[in-house]
Image: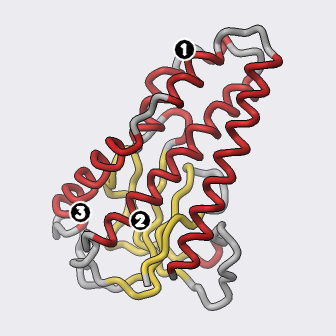
Amino acid sequence: MGKTNNLILDNLLEIEKRAKEIILRDLEDSQNEAYNPFYNLWKNQNREEHENVMIEELKINIEKYWLAEKYNSAIDKSFNMIYFEHGGLYGGELEAFAIDFDDSDRKLSEFEIDDDHMEYLDNISCLPAFVSPTLYHLTENIQGEEDNFDDFLDVNNIYELFEATALIEINKLFKRANQENVFERLNLKKPFYLAVAEHDTGAPKLIYVIE
């Protein structure tokens, strides 16, 4: 699955590149100074530090919630996907859902998951996973500033850049989590899929695959 994960990361980097180009064009075309603080906020994110924060939080929450009978009444249940959901523009917290994913006709070149193939399980359901610092920093700074932009579409362009970067960071988080055997006490069926999406926005994005 190394090739698959390389393709996934390349796709995420391309999405980030396109999102950055849109923001740079907005900065050039508009006299509105509202863009600059958010572009600078994005540029100054400490990605290495974010990865360290997320991995520690993920480890804590797996132990505290995912592997606790109080929150997971079927710890031994096997499954082949964890779907992580975040709140979009107004929330950097990600919650985890165990999924029985039908991958029988999944094409490796596709990076979005058909949610018709996802069956939600009751062992890990809406449990804390980790906070994306990149999305969190956007949330805490954008609230109350939306009307300063020329159009809400411009706010969405800012969000899409931050989300693209957050997903790249999460891809690296999952790679590290796999290397450190963070998921080893879960009953995973392989290949095991890790997917992320904003709440109620359609198809989840495939972020990492564990073989």
Q: Secondary structure at mark 2?
A: strand
Relative to 85, say whether 63 is above or below: below
Please tell me which residue is depicted at 55% across the width and 41% down the height of the picture.
88
Marking on residue 97: 2
In the rendering, at what x and y percent does residue 208 appear? 49, 69
Label 1 neighbour load within 10 Å: few <14, some 14-19, many 20+: few
- The kind of residue on which mark 2 rests is Phe
Q: Label 3 near label 2: C-beta < 8 Å?
A: no
- Disc on the earlier residue, 1 or 2: 2
Nearer the observer: mark 2 or 3; the answer is 3
What is the C-alpha distance between the residues marked 3 and 1? 34 Å
**Residue farthest right in this picture:** 29
Which of the numbered marks, if any, corresponds to residue 62? 3
Q: CA distance from mark 2 to mark 3?
A: 12 Å
Kindly indicate the quadrant of the structure image that contains residue 134: top left
Find residue 66 and name its label: none
- Callout 1, which amino acid? Gly
Name the N-terminal-most of marks 2 and 3.
3
Q: Decide: few, some or many residues near mark 2? Use Cα within 10 Å; few <14, some 14-19, many ≥20.
A: many
Which callout, 3 or 1, points at the residue further toward the start of the chain?
Answer: 3
Which residue position is annotated with label 1? 144
Vertical placement of 145 versus 61: above or below?
above
At 60% from the left and 51% from the top, the residue drawn is 200
**x%, y% of residue 76?**
24, 84
Q: Tell me if label 1 and label 2 are in contact, CB under 8 Å.
A: no
Up/down of 143 relative to 160, above or below: above
The answer to whether 82 is drawn above or below residue 126 in the figure is below
Q: How is the image coloured?
A: secondary structure
Taking the spot 55% from the left edge, 50% from the top edge, the residue there is 199
Image check: 62 left or right of 140? Answer: left
Report the Cα–Cα distance between label 1 and label 2.
31 Å
